[in-house]
Image: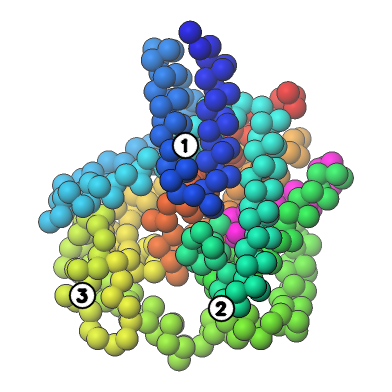
Amino acid sequence: MIQTDTLKTYLYWFVVLQVCVISVSIAASSLLLGLIILSILVLFAKEQRWFIPHTAIDVAVLAYIVIEFVTAMNSDYQFDALKNSKRLLLIVMAYAAIIAFDSKKKIRRSVQLLSGAVALLSIAEIILYYADGTERLYVFQHYMTTGGLKMIVSLMLIPFMLSTETDRSERYYYSAVFLPTMFALILTNTRSAWLGLIFGILVMSVVHYRVLFALLFAAVILFFQFAPEQQVARAKSILDFSNSTNIGRFNMWSTGLQMWQDRPLLGFGDIDLYTTYLTYRIPTGDEPAGHLHNNYVHLLVTIGIVGLSVVMFLFYKIIRTEFLVFRKAADDPFVRTIALGALAVFCGFMVNGLFEWNFGDHEIMVFVWFTVGLCISAGRVEGGTDA
């Protein structure tokens, strides 16, 4: 019979492969997610006890699971709402990491492999971008998803590059993989991901690295001086309230708030909003969307004020947990680096979500839940050896 340690090793590699391949193949990612769930079920069968460590986010996660099903049963489209509840399975990524990432060596290796895979893909995407002359960089996903994934990896890497406690060869490696990832992020022209990156960097500067204020300011100045005209114009459009895309977003959010007023408590259910949205929409040029390009408005419409409150409680617990891991690891630079990166990622994700439905994006949430699990795992192995 397979030993528990062997099963955990399989689980570890399934998680690592999942985050490494999701930028290329949803099919492979889905298969690996199935293997992750199967591995955990086999572990339960072998252990015959509850072996998943208790965490500070458990109650909030459970509340979110419950509200998803409550709002689904309240929906006029119960089947569709229940079907979309499959997004709950992605939370397994966090707990799988908590179970399997039981040493600093495993955590460090996972970050190295993920960042290396994303960097190699970014180099290929950059080459194809210039070869094809496309307007926005993307290959395997929508450019907004691509931008969000690059944002997450970039924020994870910055603390490793700045930490003087990180081995010099590692800092060189992280700097090398950061450059193509960051350049690819710029070429996606995804403004929400740019804003998420900036906010994540500001969080890191407030919490720990004051020098990041100056570096960020210098980077913004250099961007507007030397970046290609297309990217500069895209950045300037963020504050252009006459921009057609911005107007479309405002109209969409306004329509969403009108929809919410009809079902304020539990919403319409976690459904694709395309058909329902059309019955409220005033033809003004905004896209007849299946989602509302804003996590918080979309959640209001789909799971109501009760559901949004639960999700915001979950977000608060995640941020608080990651910050506490950082603060408690005063004597462990590696854990502090992991926790600071995870905290910046989640804060950047929340700002990115002001303009996108990234909470409903499969690829983005695999990365987000992975970083949550990575941080909690690092906190659990704090003070341990590098074995």
Image: 111 above or below 153: above
Percent position of residue 341, x then y: 65, 49
For the question of whether residue 272 can be seen, the reply is yes
Quarter where residue 30 is shown:
top left
Mark 2–mark 1 distance (CA, rounded to whole Å): 33 Å
In this rendering, position of residue 343 left or right of residue 109 = left
Instruction: Please name the residue shown 56% across and 57% down the image.
Output: 149
Q: Which quarter of the figure is the C terminus placed in? A: top right
Residue located beneath label 2 in the image:
135
The image's colouring method is rainbow
For the question of whether residue 322 can be seen, the reply is no
Query: The residue under label 1 is which amino acid type?
Result: Leu
10 Å crowding of disc 1: few (<14), some (14-19), many (20+): many
Is disc 1 placed on a helix, strand or loop?
Answer: helix
Residue located beneath label 3 in the image:
278
State the count of labels: 3
N-terminal label among 2 and 1: 1
N-terminal label among 3 and 1: 1
Which residue range is magenta in the image? 150-167
* Magenta-span inclusion, residue 195: no
Residue located beneath label 1 in the image:
32
Query: The residue under label 2 is which amino acid type?
Result: Glu
Query: The residue under label 3 is which amino acid type?
Result: Leu
